[in-house]
Image (cartoon, grey):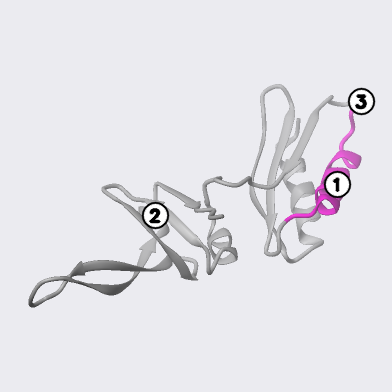
Amino acid sequence: MDSSKVKQLIDEAIAENPSLFLIDWKVTPDDKIIILADGDEGLSVEEIVRISRHVEHNLDREECDFALEVSSPGVGSNLTIPRQFAKNIGRTLEATLEDKVMEGEIVEADEEGVTIFWEAREPKPLGKGKITVEHEEKINYADIKKAIIKVTF
């Protein structure tokens, strides 16, 4: 299986809709093509079918028999590229770093990192009791070991 040809076909199919983006792809040793894509507004079944047909119809099964799987990341999937973080602005992120786990609302995402906001109850500087303190912190993508969107019901 010609991996460069497969990648070219995937790129062509994704480029047809500017709101789509490729997360990952691979060709397994047994010639299974796995494509993981998403869109700024999600990935519809119609788009999955369109991508699948574009790849499948431009490869010759006589030359190499293959299996093809096109999907979008599921709930609880690890976020891996900046565009995924940007797509989820306003949602709650749980980011596992080297030495701690942080949780907060995504307020900004760029090419270097993601900014999250959270509130915490902390002891008052003077006297007894606690106050609510707002925090905002930018986390570099390179420091994130795992990042998932928390789904609340």
Distance of mark 3 from mark 1, alpha carbons? 22 Å
Residue at 55% of width from left, 45% of height from top? 76
- Frontmost of labels 3 and 1 is 1
Distance of mark 2 from mark 1, alpha carbons? 34 Å
Q: Which residue is mark 2?
A: 142
Q: Amino acid at mark 1?
A: Val
Q: Secondary structure at mark 2?
A: helix
Q: Residue 29's x, y, as percent?
A: 67, 23
Would residue 100 be visible to someone looking at this image?
A: yes
Q: Nearer the viewer, residue 53 or 107?
A: 107
Residue at 8% of width from left, 77% of height from top? 126
Mark 2 and mark 1 lie on one chain; the one further toward the N terminus is: 1
- Tag of residue 62: 3
Relative to 83, 58 lies left or right: right
Q: Which residue is mark 1?
A: 49
Q: Residue 67's x, y, as percent?
A: 79, 29
Q: Check if residue 48 falls in the magenta segment.
A: yes
Which image quadrant for residue 15?
Answer: bottom right
- Tag of residue 9: none
Would residue 113 be visible to someone looking at this image?
A: no
Q: Amino acid at mark 2?
A: Ala
Which region is colored magenta?
A: 43-61
Distance of mark 3 from mark 2, alpha carbons? 43 Å
- Frontmost of labels 3 and 2 is 2
Q: Residue 81's x, y, as percent?
A: 54, 56
Residue at 30% of width from left, 47% of height from top? 98
- Frontmost of labels 2 and 1 is 1
Q: Secondary structure at mark 3?
A: loop
